[in-house]
Structure formats: structure tokens, C-alpha cells
Image (spheres, coloured by chain):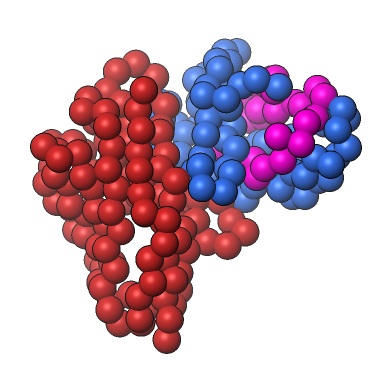
Chain colours: A red, B blue
Amino acid sequence: GEDVEQSLFLSVREGDSSVINCTYTDSSSTYLYWYKQEPGAGLQLLTYIFSNMDMKQDQRLTVLLNKKDKHLSLRIADTQTGDSAIYFCAEGPNTGFQKLVFGTGTRLLVSP
Amino acid sequence: NAGVTQTPKFQVLKTGQSMTLQCAQDMNHNSMYWYRQDPGMGLRLIYYSASEGTTDKGEVPNGYNVSRLNKREFSLRLESAAPSQTSVYFCASSEASSTDTQYFGPGTRLTVL
């Protein structure tokens, strides 16, 4: 079945760039997503990328997709303490009713 | 416009007790989902409802039942709670298929003793 993997933890200093990585196994995935979960809250969609794209930029967020290696990354420029949260990668398969498969989440800690 | 709401926020049960988690959305979405979130395991899909009147099993359906009461409401029932069901439960909805943005509720933290 599909599998999505992420590293569990990332620590950066305020103002630095953060890069959160994700690998997935389903080569037929059509959409790949990044969600953010703040403490005590549900998940909030940050951005997504179609599988026929290599890169998508949205303000401080840059998503890079290497389809050959099935590797997805999320770069946050000028990371702020308010970016501290858990970030989930998710993939959406290609056919029929598409159930998202989530990764384990990466906890980002931004220190002043 | 409240989005996706869930009740209760917290619940403690004893093994063997039953309870129903409630979820409602006011975005006129067709599809609704129940996930559980456990440490180190991300979110796993329990059940989903692609449209009003239909429900299907997800990755981890054992021990749960669901009801799509109407287009707005999708409930999750634990008939006989077990400690392994201690988790945070999230409800989500999307307009049509799950490739559309899924909007999540704030979650229910359930502890089974």
C-alpha cells in the first residue's frame, strides 16, 4: 500500500530557512499536500502541488517535487516562532475516490 | 460560518463503555471523514462518507461504526471502548472528492481507561 515518511523533528533559529522533507511510495499520486497542525488544533492546508509540477512558490513557502525519487520538500523562508508546529505531508492517489495518506508529521521548533 | 465542529473536546471512558463522537460542517460539503491521530503514526483514516447516504471503511475501521445522518453531520460510534482506542479523533470534510481541500475540526481527545 501507500506509505509516506517524514523525519520526526526539526529545530531551527528564528530567521533561518527550514526544510521539511517527505518521501512517498505511490508513483501514481496526483496531488501532494502540506498541512500544518498547531498545538491543540486540527490540520490546516498550507499548500499543495500537482504531480506534473516541479516547484510551487507561495510567499514564504516553496514546495519542491522530485517525482523520480518520490521526494517532496517544504521550505519555509525567514522562519518565525509562529511557524512552530507539526507539518504533515500527504499524498492523494490517482483514481476513483481519493483518500489521502498522511505521513507521520515533522515537529518544527523555532527558537528565538 | 463555523467550518467543521466536533463535540465533545475531551472524553474519558472506562473499558467497555460506549459513546458517540459528533461532527458537523456548515460548508455544504459532500464528503466527510473520520481520522485518528496517534503519536508517531500520523493520521489514519477510520471511515469516510463520499456523499450523503454512503459510508465506507478506511484503513482502521475495527471497533468503530459511523452514521451519515444528513449532509451536515457524520458521527463516529465506539460500541465497546478499549484502551487501544485512546487517541485524538479528527473529523474533516471536503467539497467532493478528497483531492479537494479537506477542512479539519479541532479534534476530540479520548482516553479509555
Magenta stretch containing residue B67, yes or no?
yes
In front of the other: B24 or A2: A2
In the picture provided, is B67 more to the left or to the right than B4? right
**Residue at position x 34%, y 16% from top?**
A96
Residue A30 seen in this snapshot: yes
In the picture provided, is B59 more to the left or to the right than B61? left
Residue B90 seen in this snapshot: no
Q: Where is residue B108 in the image (x, y as percent from the top left)?
A: 70, 45
Q: Residue furthest bottom?
A: A112
Q: Where is residue A106 in the image (x, y as percent from the top left)?
A: 41, 56
Please identify the quarter of the rendering in which residue A7 is found: bottom left
In front of the other: A50 or A10: A10
Q: In this view, does A37 lie above or below B53?
A: below
**Residue at position x 57%, y 25% from top?**
B60
Q: In this view, does B106 lie above or below A62?
A: above
**Residue at position x 78%, y 31% from top?**
B82
Q: In this view, does B28 lie above or below A110?
A: above
In the picture provided, is A88 more to the left or to the right than B73? left
The count of marks equals 0
Please identify the quarter of the rendering in which residue A71 is found: top left
Magenta stretch containing residue A95, yes or no?
no
* Magenta span of residues: B64-92
Q: Where is residue B36 in the image (x, y as percent from the top left)?
A: 60, 38
**Residue at position x 58%, y 43% from top?**
B37
Q: In this view, does B57 lie above or below A52?
A: above
Q: Position of residue A32 (x, y in %)?
A: 28, 40
Q: In which quarter of the image is the C terminus of chain B?
A: top right
